[in-house]
Every structure is written in structure tokens, then in C-alpha cells.
């Protein structure tokens, strides 16, 4: 293992599209959504621990999840757990982790990964990530990891490839976040686009240089703390103050789209973003009618393409549903079309407004 290879796992989201299983008090990354004996955070951590030292694996999460993270990752060191005071997009955690890694090693290179992905070929994933880290250790580039699309998906971001640079590495022409169906069809059929996995690799110092000057608020924050942070770990009070000032933007919008040193590595490790019940359905074993029943006692009659997930000891008898999810978690039961993401968001908001925060 290279001593200057680092990993940053982002684990602060809520994942409301997987409601009611994913709740504010215990979001999807801390749950065994796929019934595999470990949470998605644990699976992600173990995936990287195979080839990156635990001393160099950082987890960024909201401070309200500190206890859960420590329970699920009992060996994690205090200095490797970065606790956000409020929920933000990816710019604050990524820049904070880059500052921390630079403080330890100015030559360090890092891979940034979400904590809620399904990787079907872990050996291929390891090869691709190590190739990515090797590339950015030799080149001051910002590297994204992309997957050839298998369908015109509207729930994923896309990366448009430009000129080839090396083996499976291309310059990036553009990023598109969750396109409409017509555009997704064009992207899929063109062969020029890859799915954006949300996995990135770069030198920690390279990322900070790229972030500097791209956004006035972010630049002001970096100018105010960069020198001091190079010598000391910043205090909780400093973090609280910084997070109130840093823009709530993602890395693609605020840094990558504004930089001219962005490349993409075309990968083939088998990837699925576990953000929706449709994605869960696609990832799980199915019966002869294409139904997915997750660790539940159920009798299905004339049902097709459904997802059923119930608490232990509960029994469901379901007839005549097609393309539905029937999911019960704690005190909430949801029965709706499994691919209607907008409806799920509306249900969450309505339940919160009418019945209270404890139900979301």
C-alpha cells in the first residue's frame, strides 16, 4: 500500500428517495438495504481497506451520525472522522478533507467516494481506482470515474468524453446532471457519454488549487484558513463558522465544470447508485415474476416487478400489483409506484408537514 494514497468516504446524506427505510435518524448508508449482512458504509469502507491503509481512510458525515459511524466502524481514529455541523452538498466535505490530507502530506493523492454504491466487481474496482491514483500522482489533473451507460437513465449524472489521453482516459467535454428522458436517450445512443459515478481522484493540493478562485465565497474561506490549517487541526468552532459560509454546491458545478484540467477514466467494475427503490429492485435477486422480496414473509398473487420489504415478524399478502413498492419501516408503511421518484419526495414532505418530523 502506498503511504500517500488516501480515501475520503462521503457519508452525510439522508437518501429520502429510499424512504421509509432511509430516515433522518438513520439514513440509507448506515443500513443493510440489500440484506448482505453489513451496511453500505461498512461495505464501502471494507472495499477501500483492501488497498488503502486504514490510517489514510477518512469518513465525512454529519455530527448527528457520529455515534452510528463509531458503532459501525469501531476502529476508525478520531482524526479520520470529520463531523459536519450542518448538511451541505459535496464542496464543503471535499475541500475540508483535502485540507486535512494536505496538512498530513502535501504530496498525497486521494480518491473520493460516496458511501451508498453497489460495486459488483470489486477486483476490477480496485484496479481502476489504483490506476486512477497512479495517474493523478503523476499528473496535476482532476480525474472522474465514469461507467458506460446500460440504459437511458434520467436519475444519474453524465460525463461527455472528449479527446483520448491514454488507456481509457479522456478529456472531459461537459457534465450533465440528471437529464430529461429525451436527452438521456441521446446520451445513451451517442456513445460519447458515461455515467458519473461520483467517484473522483486527484492530488489533495491539486483540488485546492482548482477550487481557489472558482467561487467567491469558497475562495474567501480558503484564504482565511489555508495557512493556519496547514499547521494545526481546525477547531469545532472554526468548522461551524466555515460551514455557515461555504456555498451549498456540488464539486462538479463549482470546481470541475470551471476547470480546464479535468479527465475521465472509463471503468468497467459494475456500478449501481443505490438511491431509489427502482435501483434496489434492479440489484436484488428476483422471483419468476420479477418481484424482489427483501428479508420478509410475504405471499404475492398476480404481482409483477414489485419490491416488498417488511420488519421481522410482519406478514404481507398482496394481490394484483405491478411495478409497486410495499415497504414498511418502523411506524411508516408506503405503497406506491416504485419508479415514481417525484411522488416519494412529495410523500416525505407531506408526512413531515401533517404528522411530524419523527416520521421522516
Image (cartoon, rainbow, N blue to C red):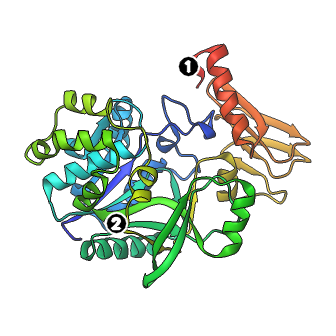
Give the secondary structure at mark 2.
loop
Give the secondary structure at mark 1.
helix
Q: Residue furthest bottom?
A: 167
Instruction: Report the front residue among 275 and 294.
Output: 275
Residue indicated by mark 1: 358
Could you tell me how far apart the alpha carbons at marks 2 and 1 are, in whole angstroms?
Answer: 38 Å
Instruction: Report the front residue among 53 and 141.
Output: 141
Quarter location, residue 193: bottom right
Q: Mark 2: few, some, or many residues within 10 Å (few <14, many ≥20)? A: few
- How many numbered marks are there? 2
> Which of pointers 2 and 1 lies earlier in the amino acid sequence?
2
231 up-or-down from 26: above or below = below
Q: Mark 1: few, some, or many residues within 10 Å (few <14, many ≥20)? A: few
Relative side of 54 to 230, left or right: right
281 up-or-down from 51: above or below = above
- Mark toward the viewer: 2 or 1: 1
Quarter occupied by the N terminus: bottom left
Quarter occupied by the C terminus: top right
96 up-or-down from 272: above or below = above
Q: Residue at x 69, y 30 (%)?
A: 346
Residue indicated by mark 2: 50
Residue 116: percent from left, percent from top: 50, 50
From where the camera sits, is residue 75 visible?
A: no
265 up-or-down from 118: above or below = below
Residue 231: percent from left, percent from top: 7, 46
Instruction: Report the front residue among 1 and 167.
Output: 167
Residue 104: percent from left, percent from top: 14, 54
Amino acid at each position: 500500500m502506498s503511504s500517500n494514497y488516501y480515501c475520503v468516504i462521503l457519508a452525510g446524506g439522508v437518501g429520502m428517495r429510499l424512504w421509509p427505510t432511509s430516515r433522518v435518524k438513520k439514513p440509507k448508508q448506515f443500513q443493510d438495504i440489500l440484506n448482505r449482512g453489513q451496511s453500505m458504509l461498512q461495505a464501502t469502507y471494507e472495499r477501500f481497506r483492501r488497498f488503502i491503509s486504514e490510517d489514510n481512510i477518512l469518513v465525512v458525515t454529519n455530527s448527528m451520525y457520529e455515534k452510528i459511524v463509531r458503532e459501525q466502524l469501531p476502529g476508525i481514529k478520531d482524526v479520520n472522522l470529520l463531523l459536519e455541523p450542518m448538511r451541505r452538498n459535496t464542496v464543503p466535505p471535499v475541500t475540508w478533507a483535502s485540507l486535512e490530507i494536505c496538512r498530513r502530506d502535501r504530496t498525497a493523492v486521494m480518491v473520493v467516494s460516496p458511501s451508498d454504491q453497489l460495486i459488483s466487481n470489486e477486483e476490477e474496482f480496485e484496479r481502476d481506482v489504483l490506476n486512477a491514483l497512479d495517474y493523478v500522482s503523476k499528473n496535476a489533473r482532476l480525474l472522474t470515474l465514469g461507467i458506460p451507460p446500460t440504459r437511458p437513465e434520467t436519475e444519474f449524472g453524465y460525463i461527455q468524453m472528449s479527446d483520448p489521453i491514454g488507456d481509457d482516459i479522456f478529456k472531459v467535454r461537459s457534465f450533465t446532471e440528471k437529464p430529461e428522458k429525451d436527452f438521456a436517450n441521446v446520451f445513451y445512443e451517442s456513445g460519447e457519454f458515461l455515467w458519473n459515478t461520483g467517484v473522483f481522484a486527484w492530488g489533495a493540493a491539486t483540488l485546492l488549487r482548482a477550487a481557489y478562485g472558482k467561487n467567491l465565497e469558497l475562495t474567501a474561506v480558503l484564504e482565511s484558513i489555508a495557512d493556519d490549517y496547514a499547521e494545526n487541526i481546525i477547531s469545532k468552532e472554526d468548522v461551524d463558522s466555515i460551514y455557515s459560509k461555504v456555498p451549498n454546491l456540488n464539486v462538479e458545478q463549482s470546481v470541475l465544470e470551471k476547470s480546464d484540467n479535468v479527465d475521465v477514466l472509463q471503468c468497467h467494475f459494475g456500478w449501481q447508485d443505490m438511491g431509489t427503490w427502482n435501483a434496489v429492485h434492479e440489484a436484488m435477486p428476483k422471483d419468476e415474476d420479477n418481484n424482489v422480496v427483501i428479508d420478509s414473509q410475504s405471499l404475492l398473487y398476480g404481482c409483477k416487478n414489485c419490491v416488498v420489504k417488511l420488519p421481522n415478524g410482519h406478514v404481507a399478502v398482496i394481490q394484483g400489483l405491478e411495478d409497486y413498492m410495499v415497504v414498511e419501516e418502523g411506524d411508516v408503511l408506503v405503497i406506491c409506484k416504485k419508479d415514481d421518484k417525484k411522488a416519494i419526495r412529495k410523500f416525505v414532505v407531506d408526512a413531515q408537514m401533517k404528522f411530524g418530523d419523527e416520521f421522516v
